[in-house]
Image (cartoon, rainbow, N blue to C red):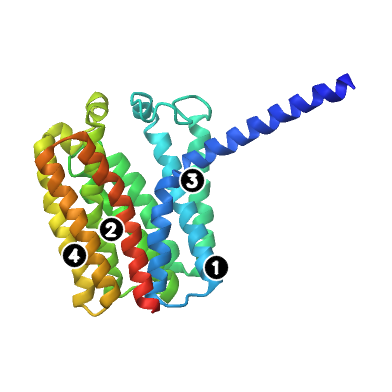
Amino acid sequence: MEAGTGARPAQASWLYGARELVGDYVALTKPRVISLLLVTTAATMFVADSSPPLGILLATLVGGYLAAGGAGAINHYIERDIDARMSRTSRRPLPSGRIEPRTALWFGIALGLVSFALFALAVNMTAALLAMAGLLGYVFVYTMWLKPRTTQNIVIGGAAGAVPPLVGWAAATGGLDASAFYLFAIVFYWTPPHFWALALLIKDEYARTGIPMLPVVDGEAETRRQIVLYGWLLLAITALPVAGGLFGAIYAGAAAALGIVFLWLCIRLYRRADRRSAAILFHYSLAYLALLFCAMAIDRVL
């Protein structure tokens, strides 16, 4: 009886440890970021083909998660010392010592390779190459080259985060056409105001680590001004697919309503210059992009 009683706590402890370890590896993939990328990927597939095959859709979403997750894990490896000096990231698996850096690196590389193989075998080579381009662009162009060197890091490097719509389009059609780049441009121009709203909230942490984010180098006032400019640009960019005949009234109405609110929040942040306005804009921007792409899919399907 005593032996059996002692075994149960030991088993529970083992299960808890295994769950924690799995959770740490999942955290390396940055699942909250990926969820938004997958929404843009899936919605784009319905834009390109109103009824994409279920097998292709699922393979694309799994492959997209693996590619973005691999990029996230490699990012954790590269920025582990920076993460250790920021309170927002100091409890991540690498700076806290729960996962060895080299293990995280190989984990990220493995995810990228599996993603490429899955896309190549189950989807098509164009989608495979685009997904790999997104991974390599995020790791080498944004994380290693731009981020530590220029305030325009998220502007130029944002191209990597705008690749998922191209992957979705290629997965659904086997190639790309001009319409796919409307969706790429929307994510590209959405990224700076979205990220700069967050950067305003954690400016002091970026300053402490020496990362030249826009609020650190050019100041909060200039950052808020740039956010408003990109808010106007985004409103204009989201109208282009309507002008080009890609979408109809459903998308047009959603893009106008969502965009006006987005721009209003940008202007409010510029005028009030407080943390609460930055936080509201940041959180709304997440919902904005998801809802905008869902509106695209609904417009095309209906």
The image shows residue 39, relative to residue 125, as above or below, that is: above
For label 2, the residue is 187
Give me the C-alpha separation between circle 4 and circle 2.
10 Å
Q: CA distance from mark 2 to mark 1?
A: 26 Å
Q: Are marks 4 and 2 in contact (CB under 8 Å)?
A: no
Residue 268 appears at what percent x and percent y?
14, 45
Of callouts 2 and 1, the N-terminal one = 1
Q: Quadrant of residue 210?
A: top left
Q: Secondary structure at mark 1?
A: helix
Q: Residues within 10 Å of mark 1 (few under 14, many from 20)?
A: some
Q: Nearer the viewer, mark 1 or mark 4?
A: 4
Kindly identify the residue that appears in the image at 18 percent across and 49 percent down.
265
Marks 2/3 in contact by CB < 8 Å: the verdict is: no
Residue type pointed to by label 1: Ala
Three-letter code for the amino acid on which mark 4 is drawn: Ile
Instruction: Provide the secondary structure element on which disc 4 rests.
Output: helix
Residue with the mark numbered 1: 122
Q: Which residue is mark 4?
A: 237
Instruction: Confirm whether residue 263 shows in the render.
Output: yes
Q: Which mark is residue 109?
A: 3
Q: Nearer the viewer, residue 266 or 71?
A: 266
Q: x, y (%) of residue 48?
A: 38, 75
> How far apart are the alpha carbons under marks 4 and 3?
35 Å
